[in-house]
Image (cartoon, coloured by chain):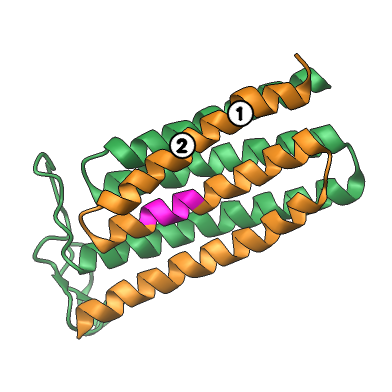
Chain colours: A green, B orange
């Protein structure tokens, strides 16, 4: 039992460390966001799971499952909103970025995506919003 | 080496160095979204530290703190994202 707990904690600490290194060393907001969101979700979930295995109690396991479910639901949402806000406020991309599909296609003032290939005529003016 | 020693000598120092890295990004970050990303990561790291500390000290009350912290970190990040967008539209 103790071995499983130690292994889960080691995995969790490793992934959280990787997330922090990513946030420190990546060249761009969006890459930092990507590194932080995914690795920190796995790291925190793994550490909390170690606590669930260690205490081996139904009430605590329920609590921990609730925390993990909340983390898994909210971290991607927060990362998406933050990335969108960063893009809309014209944060500079990394100079080695190869492609940026939204450049020149997104009307920042009206929050409207201009003609994106597969949109049909009858969709009207206000295509995709938000 | 028993479990509390493992936590105190390996897990918690690793997480502390991680929180330090995030803090360096929080101080240096060229733009506001950079700082918010670092703050969000620091909150998640604090949740990890709380879980490890709960295991090391056998105190389950730290997990209740972790629940509250998860909620606050999410709300904080979303509020900052709204703020960044609002600031841009003006």
Relative to A39, A53 lies left or right? right
Q: Position of residue A63 (x, y in %)?
A: 79, 53
Residue shown at 26% from the left, 38% from the top: A26
Can residue A130 be spotted in the picture? no
Q: Chain of mark 2?
A: B
Q: Which residue is mark 2?
A: B18
Q: Decide whether residue B39 is among the magenta residues.
A: yes
**Prevailing secondary structure class for the magenta stretch in the rendered image:** helix
Q: Quadrant of the N terminus of chain A?
A: top right
Residue A109, by quadrant, is bottom left
Measured along the vertical axis of the image, is residue A31 above or below residue A4? below
Sort mark 2 into few (<14), some (14-19) or many (20+) by Cα contacts within 10 Å. many
Residue for point 29% across, 81% down: B86
Q: Is residue B70 left or right of residue B33?
A: right
Q: From mark 1 to mark 2, how far is it between C-alphas?
A: 11 Å
Residue under the image location 47 percent in, 42 percent down: B19
Measured along the vertical axis of the image, is residue A5 above or below residue B46?
Answer: above
Residue B10 percent location from the top left of the image: 60, 23
Residue A22 seen in this snapshot: yes
Q: Position of residue B47 (x, y in %)?
A: 61, 48
Near-viewer residue (A126 or B57): B57
The residue at 53%/29% (across/down) is: B14
In this picture, which residue range is highlighted in magenta? B37-42
Which numbered disc, 1 or 2, marks the residue that appears first in the sequence? 1
Mark 1 secondary-structure assignment? helix
* Foreground residue among A27 and A65: A27
Chain ID, mark 1: B
Residue linked to disc 1: B11
Disc 2 element: helix
Q: How many marks?
A: 2
């Amino acid at each position: 039992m103790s071995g499983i707990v130690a292994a889960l904690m080691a995995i969790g600490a490793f992934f959280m460390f990787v997330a922090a290194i990513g946030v420190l060393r990546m060249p761009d907001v969006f890459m930092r966001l990507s590194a932080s969101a995914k690795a920190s979700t796995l790291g925190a979930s793994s550490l909390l799971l170690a606590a669930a295995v260690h205490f081996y109690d139904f009430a605590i396991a329920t609590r921990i499952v609730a925390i993990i479910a909340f983390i898994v639901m909210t971290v991607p949402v927060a990362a998406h909103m933050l990335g969108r806000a960063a893009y809309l406020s014209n944060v500079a991309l990394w100079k080695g970025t190869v492609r940026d599909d939204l450049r020149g296609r997104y009307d920042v003032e009206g929050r409207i995506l201009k003609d994106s290939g597969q949109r049909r005529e009858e969709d009207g003016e206000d295509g995709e919003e938000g | 080496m028993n479990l509390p020693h493992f936590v105190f000598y390996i897990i918690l120092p690793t997480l502390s160095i991680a929180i330090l890295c995030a803090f360096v990004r929080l101080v240096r970050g060229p733009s506001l979204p950079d700082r918010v990303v670092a703050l969000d990561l620091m909150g998640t790291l604090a949740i990890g530290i709380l879980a490890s500390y709960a295991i090391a000290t056998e105190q389950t009350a730290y997990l209740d703190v972790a629940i509250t912290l998860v909620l606050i970190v999410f709300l904080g990040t979303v509020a900052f994202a709204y703020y960044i967008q609002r600031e841009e539209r003006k």
